[in-house]
Image: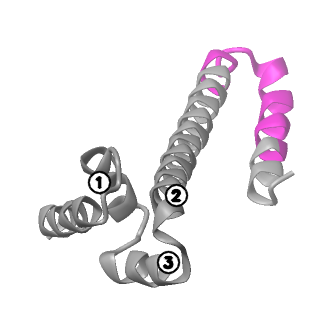
């Protein structure tokens, strides 16, 4: 399914003389754009700037994907560090309660996006 959509996108990009069409096709499809959406965009724009607009869209979607991956990665690393801290304080009873309070406060601030 994904391959078919990318193939269709590549064909459309080549028909409209978009440079780097093969590179952009997978990014555009992964970003949720299809040939129908690009046709609608192409109808609104002069042919001489369509290449620039589609390239900009592809680069923007690639950038958003990279930021999403980075956000997910930092969140996972943060959870690993918190788990490691909790584990390292398990055998120290006088610090366990402080750590428990800290962990709960971190969870709530993460949950509420603070």
Q: Viewer-proximal residue, 7 or 46?
A: 46
Residue depicted at x 45% and y 76%: 42
Which tag is nearer the camera, tag 2 or tag 1?
A: 2
Q: CA distance from mark 3 to mark 1?
A: 18 Å
Label of residue 57 in the image? 2
Element assignment for label 2: helix
Instruction: Tell how many labels.
Output: 3
Residue depicted at x 38% and y 81%: 39
Q: Which residue is mark 3?
A: 41
- Location of the N terminus (image quadrant): bottom left
Left or right of 38, for residue 46: right
The magenta-colored residue range is 86-105
Left or right of 1, for residue 42: right
Which tag is nearer the camera, tag 3 or tag 1?
A: 3
Q: CA distance from mark 3 to mark 2?
A: 11 Å
Q: Earlier in the sequence, mark 3 or mark 2?
A: 3
Residue 108 appears at what percent x and percent y?
80, 53
Residue 78 appears at what percent x and percent y?
64, 31
Residue 90 inside the magenta-drawn segment: yes
| Image marks 3 and 2: residues in contact by CB distance under 8 Å | no
Residue 101 against residue 36 in the figure, above or below: above
Q: Which residue is mark 1?
A: 26
């Amino acid at each position: 399914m994904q391959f078919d959509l990318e193939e269709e996108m590549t064909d459309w990009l080549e028909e409209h003389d978009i440079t780097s069409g093969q590179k952009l096709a997978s990014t555009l499809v992964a970003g949720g754009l299809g040939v129908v959406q690009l046709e609608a965009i192409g109808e609104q724009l002069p042919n001489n700037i369509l290449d620039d607009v589609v390239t900009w869209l592809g680069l923007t979607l690639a950038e958003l994907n990279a930021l999403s991956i980075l956000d997910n990665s930092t969140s996972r690393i943060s959870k690993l560090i918190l788990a490691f801290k909790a584990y390292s304080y398990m055998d120290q009873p006088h610090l366990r309660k402080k750590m428990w309070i800290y962990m709960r406060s971190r969870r709530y601030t993460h949950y509420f996006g603070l």
